[in-house]
Image (cartoon, rainbow, N blue to C red):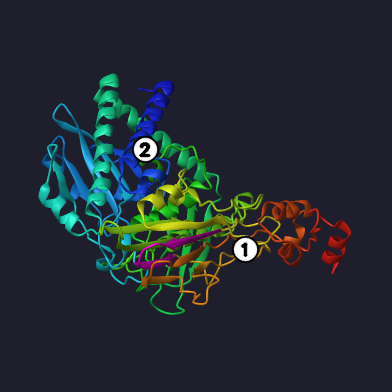
């Protein structure tokens, strides 16, 4: 079977199914964080457990689903499954991320046998733990982060397992909402079964699997061709994670050693520091996701993501390190370490790909709260993260207030503020670009975000800035660091104070206002080489102040018209 047109048609059909069922599941979720942002990863696997297709968004979650599905098959072999089964799973030592990120798997039967397996993951509203949404900033073990669910059958032949449902509900602050989220994942599996059976009916099961084998071989070939364009040799890079929220002033270094031999590539992180006591550790699946994302930055981004893509890649992530911790390590703040993996690989490849270099960007700041609603008395759990912006690229500015696609994909975790105000006892006061936060450079780092929320009810507040506040995102090639972010409680009031970047369960009264400052990305190149007209544009659009234009870029902006004073700029830069 060597029909390239049919092969491309099937490839697009599989990719579309993965995306469609992901959108369907996300829109069915009860949590506004999910149903408005589409924060979900879905994938299709063949009976051998090989990845067939996955969503383009949320690569960090998609890598977890791939490994989690293999672990599922160890506990539930194909012959133990029934049509209509659905399995729930969240163990981050067996492919997961942390307890609140839940995986659901559903076998797709054809003629009495498992023909394919659907897998999906999304963050659910709450599964217990020390703080709302199972994301305590100061966790030291996985038990602080929520209920750990082994691979158990949630539905048997289409009927719910009420014992498992009762267990999950009993361990959540928001039982109705958490089961609504998990059932949405199951609903996505039901749609995936319909769509995959339609493909089987159209092409025949054996023929479809044969085409899928060809697609995997093609992905492998394209991946090897991309790797072969990188000169053989060994490349090294590193990046620092600033702290774990537990041990004061202790940082952790991630070290990458990359070896290219023809069409094969090996990533070795054996030089990385031992695992942290706090929750900045990255489980195996998450470290792998950072590696895969960084590699994709230097390959053809259109290579289909299936099992063939992974064949040329070998990975060494030593057990007991920050990039692969031992049980029962906490991992809910792993994104700082994953981003350090990405930046260390980009640094390693910078001499080979000078046109694809990007300065480090910001990392997520998550605001969490839990309490009782003043009208109904019901428990509520609030999660509002915002991911850090991109650093400057070697040929253009970073993207302001927008994250790398590793975590948020196409959705960028966008949410409707008015809906949040309807759902929770709070009011958004401000949501804007944080001026002067982008690192100065010939190419400016992306600006971070300034967000303010007033809580209208007493609650337990958790502030969770993942990384890059005390050691802000660094600049490259003469570029300057972005501005490190953080938190301000009751800004401008007599009781104003700054909590540390990571603080769990601060009891605050109604009327408390929290200001979230998301770190800006690092700059690239000498700021004095930035064209004055670009600095003027940044001033006019609110990204850079007039004072910073003169201080950081040597550009004098007329306060009346907002135009560049060329003579004053020449004198200032000359000094």
- Residue at label 1? 475
Name the image quarter holding the C terminus.
bottom right
Relative horizontal placement of residue 516, taking residue 541 as reference (left or right): left
Residue 43's image quarter? top left
In primary-sequence order, the first of circles 2 and 1 is: 2
**Residue 285, percent from left and from top:** 34, 55
At 13% from the left edge and 40% from the top edge, which residue is drawn? 81
Relative horizontal placement of residue 499, taking residue 541 as reference (left or right): left
Q: Secondary structure at mark 2?
A: helix
Q: Reply yes or no: does residue 458 show up in magenta.
A: yes
Mark number displayed over residue 240: none
Name the image quarter holding the N terminus.
top left
Q: Reply yes or no: does residue 250 show up in magenta.
A: no
**As drawn, 24 above or below 460:** above
Q: Secondary structure at mark 1?
A: loop
**Residue 59, percent from left and from top:** 41, 48
Give the residue furthest to the bottom: 248
Q: CA distance from mark 2 to mark 1?
A: 37 Å
The answer to whether residue 313 of the structure is visible from this angle is no
Mark number displayed over residue 23: 2
**As drawn, 173 above or below 222:** below
Q: Main secondary structure of the magenta part?
A: strand
**Residue 177, percent from left and from top:** 26, 50
Residue 217's image quarter? top left
Disc 2 versus disc 1: nearer the observer: 2
Give the residue furthest to the right: 567
Comparing 450 with 192, the one in front is: 450
What range of the chain is rendered magenta? 449-465
* Mark 2, other Cα within 10 Å: few <14 / some 14–19 / many ≥20: many
């Amino acid at each position: 079977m060597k029909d390239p047109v049919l092969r491309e048609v099937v490839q697009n059909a599989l990719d579309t199914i993965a995306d469609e069922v992901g959108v369907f599941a996300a829109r069915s979720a009860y949590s506004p964080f999910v149903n408005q942002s589409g924060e979900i990863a879905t994938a299709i696997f063949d009976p051998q457990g090989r990845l067939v297709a996955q969503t383009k968004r949320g690569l960090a979650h998609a890598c977890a689903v791939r490994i989690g599905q293999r672990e599922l098959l160890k506990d539930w072999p194909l012959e133990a499954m029934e049509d209509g089964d659905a399995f729930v799973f969240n163990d981050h030592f067996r492919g997961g991320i942390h307890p609140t990120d839940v995986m659901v798997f559903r076998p797709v039967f054809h003629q009495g046998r498992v023909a394919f397996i659907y897998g999906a993951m999304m963050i659910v509203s709450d599964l217990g733990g020390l703080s709302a949404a199972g994301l305590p900033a100061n966790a030291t073990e996985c038990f602080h982060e929520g209920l750990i669910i082994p691979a158990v059958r949630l539905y048997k032949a289409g009927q719910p397992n009420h014992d498992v449902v009762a267990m999950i509900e009993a361990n959540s602050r928001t039982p109705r909402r958490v089961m609504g989220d998990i059932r949405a994942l199951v609903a996505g599996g039901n749609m995936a079964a319909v769509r995959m059976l339609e493909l089987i009916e159209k092409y025949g099961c054996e023929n479809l699997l044969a085409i899928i084998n060809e697609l995997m071989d093609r992905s492998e070939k394209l991946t090897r061709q991309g790797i072969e364009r990188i000169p053989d040799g060994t490349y090294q890079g590193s990046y620092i994670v600033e702290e774990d929220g537990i041990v004061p002033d202790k940082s952790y270094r991630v070290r990458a050693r990359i070896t290219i031999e023809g069409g094969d590539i090996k990533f070795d992180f054996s030089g990385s520091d031992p695992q942290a006591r706090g929750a900045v550790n990255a489980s195996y699946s998450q470290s792998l996701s950072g590696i895969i994302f960084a590699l994709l930055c230097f390959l053809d981004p259109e290579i289909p993501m299936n099992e063939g893509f992974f064949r040329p890649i070998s990975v060494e992530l030593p057990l007991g390190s920050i990039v692969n911790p031992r049980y029962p390590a906490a991992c809910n703040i792993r994104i700082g370490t994953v981003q350090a993996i990405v930046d260390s690989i980009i640094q390693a490849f910078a001499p080979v790909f000078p046109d694809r270099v990007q300065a480090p960007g910001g990392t997520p700041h998550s605001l969490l709260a839990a309490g009782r609603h003043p009208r109904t008395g019901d428990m509520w759990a609030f999660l509002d993260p915002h991911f850090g912006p991109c650093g400057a690229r070697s040929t253009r500015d970073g993207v302001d207030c927008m994250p790398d696609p590793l975590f948020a994909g196409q959705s960028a975790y966008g949410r409707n503020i008015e809906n949040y105000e309807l759902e929770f006892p709070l009011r958004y006061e401000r949501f804007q670009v944080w001026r002067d936060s982008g690192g100065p450079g010939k190419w400016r780092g992306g600006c971070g975000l300034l967000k303010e929320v007033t809580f209208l009810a007493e609650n337990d507040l958790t502030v969770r800035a993942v990384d890059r506040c005390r050691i802000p995102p660094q600049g490259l090639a003469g570029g300057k660091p972005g501005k490190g972010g953080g938190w301000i409680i009751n800004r401008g009031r007599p009781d104003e104070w700054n909590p540390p970047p990571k603080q769990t369960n601060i009891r605050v009264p109604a009327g408390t206002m929290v200001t979230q400052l998301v770190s800006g990305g690092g700059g690239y190149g000498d700021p004095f080489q930035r064209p004055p007209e670009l600095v003027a544009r940044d001033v006019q659009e609110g990204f850079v102040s007039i004072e910073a234009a003169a201080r950081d870029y040597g550009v004098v902006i007329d306060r009346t018209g907002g135009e560049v004073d060329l003579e004053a700029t020449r004198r200032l830069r000359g000094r």
